[in-house]
Image (cartoon, grey):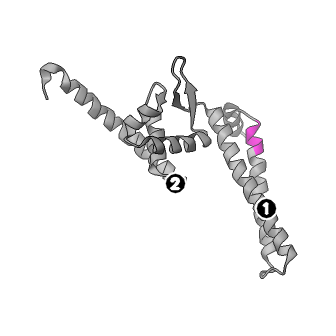
Amino acid sequence: IDKSCGLLPMVMDQEVRALLKRHMIDACVKVANSRGCCDAVGVLQGTLFLTDAPLSMDQLVEETGYSKSTVSINMGILERMGLVKREVIPGDKRYHYVPVRDPDSLRRDMIANIRQNLQDILIALDRTEADLKAGDGPDPSAPARIEEIRRYYRRTDRMLDLMSRYSTEELISRLEAPI
């Protein structure tokens, strides 16, 4: 490394940057994996967390080393999860991505995703129950188990409904209030 050309500070900046990124990206990969997503979801989310400016698809490709198709697919996953959003920068036709940092926006998207999952399960329970009623089910205890599962998911949906009525700050205030 030629110190007279100023390369040493650039290399050191890269080393410090890599060290800072490692912990955030490792944590994001762990969270992504726990949700059933691949490492790329976590790497992309962690990369966005650590930037001050929106990043284009090309910048994410360069930053992560993933192919454009891998970045595109996994950014779509992060968008659907409500963890990132696209922005258009005036004068630039490309999409740029930023992490969602607003707690109310995150909460709304998380509740919407969970509610969709709940609705899918409730529909499946209704169909299962209808199929059992149409024929002789092999297990006479199945209807009772279906109803138990249905009650659980309906109560969870009710809890989400209550949570969606308040802002994040209002929820924290209400939950921390003395009884």
Write down the quadrant of residue 2 in the picture: top left
- Which is more N-terminal, label 1 or label 2? 2
Q: Residue furthest top?
A: 91
> Would you name the residue on which mark 2 appears?
34
Q: Does the magenta stretch include residue 162?
A: yes
Which residue, given by chain and number where applicable, does mark 1 sit on?
A: 150
Mark 2 and 1 residues: CB-CB less than 8 Å, in contact? no
Question: Percent from the top left, x then y, of residue 60?
Answer: 43, 35
Instruction: Find the distance from the CA under tag 2 to the CA under tag 1.
Output: 25 Å
Q: Does the magenta stretch include residue 91?
A: no
Q: Is residue 28 visible?
A: no
Label 2 Cα neighbours within 10 Å, binned few <14 / some 14-19 / many ≥20: few
Asked if residue 147 lies left or right of residue 40, the reply is right
Taking 88 as reference, is 117 above or below it?
below
Q: Is residue 13 left or right of residue 147?
A: left
> Is residue 109 toward the left or the right of residue 72 in the image?
right
> Which residue is found at the position 38% from the left and 42% from the top?
23
Q: Which amino acid does label 1 sit on?
A: Arg
User: The C terminus appears in which quarter of the rendering?
Assistant: top right
User: Dominant secondary structure of the magenta stretch?
Assistant: helix
The residue positioned 72% from the left and 36% from the top of the image is 174
**Disc number placed over residue 48 in the picture, else none:** none
Q: Which residue is drawn at 78% across and 64% down?
A: 125
Q: What stretch is highlighted in magenta?
A: 161-165
- The N terminus: image quadrant: top left
- Rendered residue at 52%/54% (across/down): 34
The amino acid at mark 2 is: Ser
SS for callout 1: helix
